[in-house]
Image (cartoon, rainbow, N blue to C red):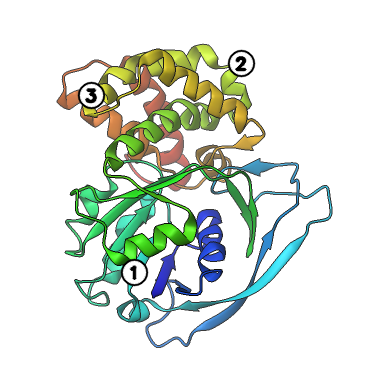
Amino acid sequence: MNVAIIGAGSIGQLLFHDLRLSDDINPVFIDTRLPPDAPGISYVFEYCKEAEPSETASEASSEIHSEKTAVKESYQGMVLPQEKAADQDLIVITVKANQCSQVLQSLKGNLPEHIPVVLLMNGMGIWEEARTILPNPFWTGVTSRGAVHEGRTVYPRGNGATYIGSPEHQKPIPEIELLARSIGAVISPRIEEEQIQKLLVNACINPLTALHQCKNREIAAAYQKEALEIFSEIYPVLKTLGLTVSADIAFDLIITVAEKTGENYSSMAVDFKKKRPSELEYILGYILKNGERLHKSLPITENLYALLKNQETAFSGITP
């Protein structure tokens, strides 16, 4: 099976590494920025198994400085232009949520309608946008696997779970089953629940770490009160959307994740440090839109969103 990954960041490289170990899958990267007539480009990628970077970030950071000698596994990967999407059996998109629509727009005219697409990224509301751009069958996924990358070297940072499912509750197709087996993912018939639970954790950790420019562990220490205030507002909204865990268990999960990934900087914290667009709209923005629809007041969450949105607007040069 031919599988193309769009998005050569931490999760994309980690996924590529896993897929290349399968005898049944031929993975490649597709870069939608390459000219249409560009030849395939061969790159050497590295999978670092035993590095301990002093500065790390979950899923998206390129800022790592290894204090120990890394044990690296080198392998070649092909990077192809978007026109080669038509030669694939499955497309997996691992860019950030705020970049996904642009990627999908670039695939128009290059991707036959029958080829399934997996959206594997943080945030929610992405699938709803995607289905207005392309008619292809879409699958969505979430992962708690940690990784950081520096160029074409990826550093795994934990063995979290990955879930893939159909937002339209389609039965698993052979391409999805093979993908799941190859990367150790679970095919979930209730993928929305997995996404909402991940959204809850992201909403209580990522924005606060972006605001305070701190590691995740500080959410469980210095900023636990702020996290609880956000949680108390958004929990009823997410409960209405399908969150099934109790409030006590849910908040314990947030603190556990913050502590377990304590040395990490969230991807949003890294984005704000580097002054680049983040997934804010697909995390807090998504929750606020649903809160408004459900007539629920979320003043603390709105204030946090506004503070971050103003910063993001300022460094991106976008006029509000």
Identified by mark 2, the residue type is Ala
Front in this rendered view, residue 172 or 314: 172
Identified by mark 1, the residue type is Leu
Q: Which mark is residue 222?
A: 2
From mark 2 to mark 1, how far is it between C-alphas? 44 Å
**Mark nearer the N terminus (3 vs 1):** 1
Q: Which residue is mark 1?
A: 90
Classed neighbour count for the residue bearing mark 3: other residues with Cα under 10 Å, few (<14), some (14–19), many (≥20): some
Residue 49 located left or right of residue 1: right
Q: Quadrant of residue 243?
A: top left
Instruction: Say which residue appears at 53% left-offset and 40% top-offset.
Output: 272
Q: Secondary structure at mark 2?
A: loop
Q: How many marks overall?
A: 3
Q: Is residue 109 above or below residue 128?
A: below
Front in this rendered view, residue 28 or 276: 28
Instruction: Say which residue appears at 38% left-offset and 55% top-offset.
Output: 99
The image quadrant where one finds the N terminus is: bottom left
**Mark nearer the N terminus (2 vs 3):** 2
Query: Is residue 103 visible to the viewer in this orientation of the structure?
Result: no
Give how far across and how far down residue 299 sits, in percent: 32, 15
Give how far across and how far down residue 318 sits, in percent: 37, 46
Q: Are marks 2 and 3 in contact (CB under 8 Å)?
A: no
Q: Is residue 100 above or below residue 33?
A: above
Q: Which residue is mark 3?
A: 291
Q: Is residue 164 above or below residue 295?
A: below
Give how far across and how far down residue 115 sits, in percent: 26, 71
Instruction: Say which residue appears at 33% left-offset and 16% top-offset.
Output: 233
Identified by mark 3, the residue type is Gly
